[in-house]
Image (cartoon, rainbow, N blue to C red):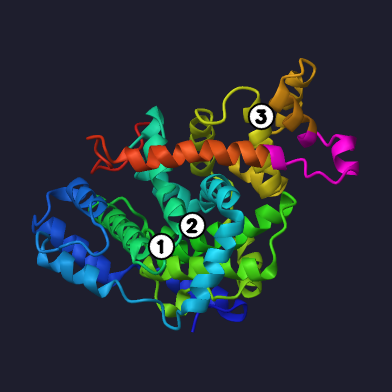
Amino acid sequence: MPLKAEYVAQELEKASTAGDPEADALVSDLIDNRKVDGVNALFRTVASLKHGQDRSHLPPELAEFLAGAEAEPPGWGDADVKAAEKFFDRHRGEVAMLQGTVGLIGTYLSPTGAFTLRSTGRLGGVEGPGRRLSQSSRLFIDMDKKGAMTDGTLAANVTKVRLVHASVRQMHKKSGEWDYAKWGEPVSQKYTTGAACVFSTQILQAMANLGLDVSRDDAHGFICAWHYVNHYLGTPEKWLLPKDADEVERLWNQERDKEWKKTDDGVFMTQQALNYYKQFVPGPFHNAFVAMIRTALTDKYADMAGLPQGVLDAAAKPLAAGHGLVSKAGGGLLGGAAEKTTGVNPYKEVLGVASSAFREMEHAAVTQGQDDQPQMHQELGDNR
């Protein structure tokens, strides 16, 4: 039975020391016995996998694992797929963008999560976070594709992430630097399910904070999609998000403030993200974009993440010059009386532009694998 608010605290405590035994054993065997040449070779092998392809060229252990990982979540059915697809039909653009901004920043508010991400961050490190951020967005692209939950595409791509998580656990184990007493298991089942909460119910709350209307039926569909993803990340049924939007919101509201804290690692990761977003949402409009993220997260959590304050004042500067779109969007964000009295959502303009810009990030995610840079340094650190 999936998680319930009444006993989620006890279950998450157990989940904090649990990895993914099947995936962990596979990755350890592949690397230790040189069936693949290290972490990067494993990542490249996993990144090339597609649903339904011939697996005879793979190490037999990997092919067997992938076959076993194809099973659907217990109780999954056509109604769940239809509910999820209905949500994405209505909210595809804005939800992908919010997951890739508000959602990713939300994961940095978990001290363990932020430390894990930063300590394995030499795939961009202080020189630039583009690879991690663009690759993280691949999952959000796949989720909203019609048929992705029935043709095996999404399941296959999430399974890749599952193996990446197992690789990160192996890196930390071999480093001898991970404090298991303090942090629990690297990329534990607690962190995986917590991240699923951030990318699901936290995003629904962000949409509400921005004045976007999402019906309860559509909210249910979005939670179903993340129940599906949670399963293919290797999470046992007892720690899966339930397919119930109200219950997931209850348990997340109950546990969030126990998990989210301000840390140097989290602030660092957030700043890297903001720097990366400037490539896609540049100039004065970037201030309005950051203001939107603050509103979506609320000031309490935006401050924890180190999102700059006073961005609305900065966004106001181009208004006097009358710079078209920026002026219009900035005026709405600044709470213009005309917009409010006429019932126009002041964030719609920013959401539209940001969602369009995020499609460029999606393209970067898709094309990122075409280069020959290593996906992760095999030693820990972020080039500090």
* Location of the C terminus (image quadrant): top left
User: From this viewpoint, is residue 16 visible?
Assistant: no
Say what secondary structure mark 3 lies in: helix
Residue assigned mark 3: 287
Mark 1 sits on what residue? 148
Towards the viewer: 336 or 90: 90
| Rendering quarter of residue 68 | bottom left
Q: Amino acid at mark 1?
A: Ala
Whether residue 53 is visible here, answered yes or no, is yes
**288 relative position to 242: left or right:** right
- Label 2 sits on a secondary structure element that is loop
Q: Position of residue 270 (x, y in %)?
A: 53, 39
Q: CA distance from mark 2 to mark 3?
A: 28 Å
Residue for point 37% across, 56% down = 179
Instruction: Give the side of residue 312 with respect to residue 354, left or right.
Output: right
Q: Position of residue 192 (x, y in %)?
A: 44, 63
Nearer to us of marks 3 and 1 is 1
Name the residue located 62 percent from the left edge and 71 percent from the top edge.
Answer: 245
**Which amino acid lies under the numbered mark 3 shown in the image of this protein?**
Asn
Residue 175 in percent (x, y) is at 25, 50
Between marks 2 and 3 in the image, the one whose residue lies nearer the viewer: 2
Q: For the magenta stretch, what is the residue range?
A: 332-349
Tag on residue 144?
A: 2
Q: Is residue 343 magenta?
A: yes
